[in-house]
Amino acid sequence: MIEVYKKDSIIPKQRIELYAKQVQAIVSRCITNRINDTLEVHAEAQKLATKCFETLAFVCQLQLKERDFSLAACQGHMRELWGADQFESLSESGKHFFFAPIVGLLTGVGNDAYKFSHLTLQEYLAAKCAVYLYGHDFGMLLSHLQPLHSRWTRKLLQFVACLLQPESVFAAFCGQVLECDDESRTCCELVWDFLHERGGSEEVEQMVRDKLQVIRGTGHLISGLFHQSPEIRRPFDKTKVVLSEMKQFGIPSDPFVIVARLKKVAEDYEAE
């Protein structure tokens, strides 16, 4: 962050912007120190090296599901992803970064094993690779990120959502994620996290509300509000019970929709 601030006199608001600048600066500096050639050669080497790190992160995060890795363990997966020719180019470019001192994106953990210096950096690089590999084929993309709520995919999905441009593409992606919801509203939570990471979108916020309205329904909300258990009724943010859920997601969008029903229930209770 200090390095980015010294260069640009500002810290990016989004992590993907910060990580993009960080990766570019570290890889560029390492290439300059190790490869004596023209700027054009440096630019191509930086492109291939970054792609190599993104692929390594993808393999570690989604295929091996590990922090620590060895190049030998990753090579087969990388070859399968890119094919023999591209794999050779990536390997040739990446080998410069594993000689001491190791490139700053990585940390040596002994016995020819490494790990990315931060887990969120690994998640960001893996997301870059996922978007590069599968583009806007959201069905294929999401099939490689199952289960969507696991610790290996949840943060990665947030980065994917931030990388998808323009907003219409992001909205389409969120629609596909919401279709995966099994009525546990887990995917609604995921998409809400996307908005927190990326920034608000009225279209996507309404999509989440519509989905929750289908899952919960007015009847379920009323049942929750009049549930015998006070823990269900009260707005405890951490437990995501009925009132806090209504507040968090703004459902129903028109609260007066349920006023008449609530009044009728209250009258029935009073009559009893």
Image (tube, grey):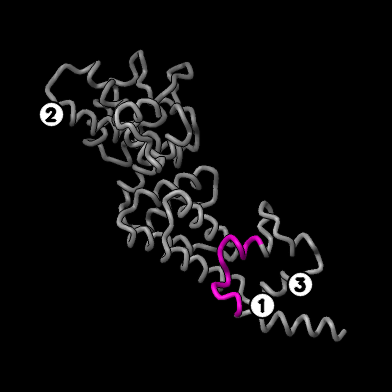
Q: Nearer the viewer, mark 3 or mark 1?
A: 3
In percent of width and height, residue 111 lies at 46, 16
Q: Amino acid at mark 2?
A: Glu
Whether 67 is drawn above or below 146: the answer is above
Say few, some or many: other residues with alpha carbon within 10 Å of mark 3 (under 14 / 14 to 19 / 20 or more).
some
Which of marks 2 and 1 precedes in the sequence? 2
The vertical placement of 129 against 108, above or below, is below
Q: Of all residues shown, which one is farthest toward the front?
A: 9
Where does label 3 land, which residue? Answer: 226
Q: Amino acid at mark 1?
A: Gly
**Mark pair 3, 2: CA separation:** 68 Å
**Left or right relative to 120: residue 17:** left
Q: Residue at x 50, y 52 (%)?
A: 193
Magenta segment includes 254:
yes
Q: Which residue is mark 2?
A: 40
Where does label 1 land, which residue?
A: 219
Bounds of the magenta segment: 244-256
Front one among 261 and 79: 261
